[in-house]
Image: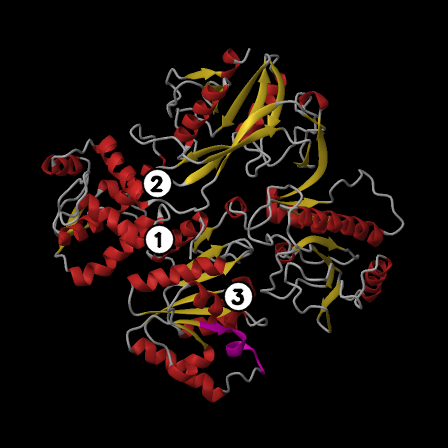
Amino acid sequence: MELKEFQLNAVKSLFEAMDKPARDIILKSPTGSGKTIILTYFMHQFIQSFPKTVFVWLTPGKGNLEEQSKAKMDKYIHASQTKLLSDVMTAGFEENDSAFINWEKLTKKGNNALKDSEQTNFLEHIQHALDSGLRFVVIVDESHQNNTVKADEIIQYFHTDKIIRCSATPKEIKNAEIIEIAEADVIAEGLIKKLLVINEDFPQTVETENQTGFLLERAYDKQRKLRAAFLSAGKDINPLIVVQIPNKSEVLQDEVERWFETQGVTFENGQLAVWLSDRHENLEGIEENDAKAIAVIIKQAVATGWDCPRAHILVKLRDNMDETFEIQTIGRIRRMPEAKHYNSDLLDSCYLYTLDEKFTAGVKRSLGKGALEAYTIFLKNEYKSITLTSEQRTMVTQTRNPQAALTAVAKYFEKEYHTGGNKAENATRLQTAGFVLDEDIVRHTISGETATLDFQAAGMNEINVTEKLDTHRHGRDYHQKIGKIGLEIGMEYSYMNTIIRKLFDKKFSYSRKILALEPRAVYSFVLNNADRLRHIVREAMAVELAQLQFDIKQVSKSPFRIPQSCLFTFDSTAKTQTEMRKNVYQGYLSSAEVRSSSERKFEKFCESADSVEWVYKNGDKGSEYLSIVYMDNSEKQKNFFPDYIIGVNGEIWIVETKGGFDRSGNSQDIDLYTPKKFAVLKDYLDRYGLKGGIVRYDEKSEELCICMDNYSDDIRDDCWKVLSDIVK
């Protein structure tokens, strides 16, 4: 099982949260982010590091979610020790178990899945496990549905000190440790659609005698365009329209059914489906990408756990009643049919059609910049001939090369700590830099006096507590630390362990070996310096290393032309809606979204600068946009999409914008790869005779500054020039 980078980061955060005092850990993960993959991988890794652990995964009511989750873990984790409630009732809980249990079989009144005698037996199984020294970790799936007294009573039986609560819309819990997976990361990996487009190409004033027909007509037209686009791409995917009607609205339901009948979409030919509490038609196999149904009628949010990635369009019909906005409803149309983007704005977006202002407001509150109004804008004729060369990665694998990663880490030590061939000198240099080179395990605590509980450790005495190394007892700690170091760069435990051993273990041969420690001393070295090693490994993948080959052996090159049209997304609530006259597209507004603060400042600068003739905002993913290929230091190929292509006094410039510098000169750029991106951008510009660079905002001078020849993260460096002095 190969996890995406954001999924590995979530696993890493879960491990860190398990070390913190908070009992409750909230995993807020958008629909489609692979929550089950994240959790099952975490459970598998955790059990290897911490014996005597039992995971209990509690799922909500209907839909057999517990069986689905168990099946996924069995699929992803070979030889996993999974159980259902029936298995627990037969064999009890055992070390390394992962038990998947439906809440309602334990809590719902009138549910006979557990009779009183069986419930007592279930509690006895828990107590027997606790008496045997087992530790329970509880996972609450879809936790927003089970925040009840009954549910809390069940959790208390397990006497757990850690509860992981998972939901796209979690309830707030005081003092909880929160792990939030950013939607942008899930979108970047292609698992969910880039945008939710609201009421695309609607007129400013909608005049219609039949609101239902007005919305359904646009949704059906969009469905046919999507279907045609999928077929043109060689994909037999039939996009689904989800029509949500209010409760107690039989008249409206009849109206929807009659409208579809006029289009030849009926229950009889299998193209219309219905999913209501008292009526189910044409639902079998509806989740399949090539299923026959074009539309499904629902009322409240569809049952938890229903995944239909081909669902692309939501029509929300309103009534005069207030209805609670359900983010889960939107989640049903956000998954990608094949868990990847198609490099097409049309296919990589989902669509909402509604005249319900309150529902629209709820969507915007929940999705923020992920839900925007949109219309199609077209390229001005004078820019249709602009041509550049775009590069796309050709390496299919997303994995890192362990040998290249080893070299990168070794060179990072050489660059930062000046290590070389003399192991004794290396040891001295590392100790001077703060590394602990002790065969014992060294822990740290403090002593001193304080008048308040909110004390500062800086004012206390630091005490070192040493503990004799026991390779058997500390072996799992070592495994856990190596696993965490590997998670920093998505490297499996076995590869990461080999890298550490080659660098520091005398038994492993390697030309760039830093220390020659006895094998048992490597345990101490890792346990005493784990946090420092994690930082080094992460930095080593991104830092500029002059000795490393920068050339990409396999790059696909193709002509790039500015797309003839694009789906323009904007914030209709912004104070200004000025048309940007220098943009290459007709109708491009100052309220364009999604835009960072740096991008917004740069667009305003271009609009006012006399020397700037035209501006194109490049996309951030897809073969239709300008891309440059680079590798990180473990030879993982990445695509870099520069933010802007602009015309300046008859020349083409390419510009990347980044976070700025605060008034003290501190960097606000969070991208570790900026120096590497600068190098590939400069190389590209030199090869094709173009100009450009990295632009950042300096708060002290209140000026945009550009770096063109060399890169520095220090705004005081002479390589940074005021942009208005250069572009004039």
Q: Which residues are magenta?
A: 100-110
Instruction: Give, as a three-letter code, the residue at label 3.
Output: Asn
Image check: 207 left or right of 686? right
Say which of marks 3 and 1 sits in front: 1
Q: Is residue 128 magenta?
A: no
**Residue 35: x, y in percent?**
49, 58
**Residue 218: x, y in percent?**
79, 48
Of the image marks 2 and 1, the number of the one nearer the N terminus? 1
Asked if residue 453 can be seen in this view, the reply is no
**227 to 292, vertically: above or below:** above
Q: Which mark is residue 147?
A: 3
Residue 619 occupies which quadrant of the picture?
A: top right
Mark 2, Cα crowd under 10 Å, few <14 / some 14-19 / many 20+, is: many
For the residues labelled 3 and 2, the Cα–Cα distance comes to 44 Å
**Quadrant in the picture for the C terminus:** top right
Q: Are marks 2 and 1 in contact (CB under 8 Å)?
A: no
Say which of marks 3 and 2 sits in front: 2
At 43% from the left and 26% from the top, the residue drawn is: 678
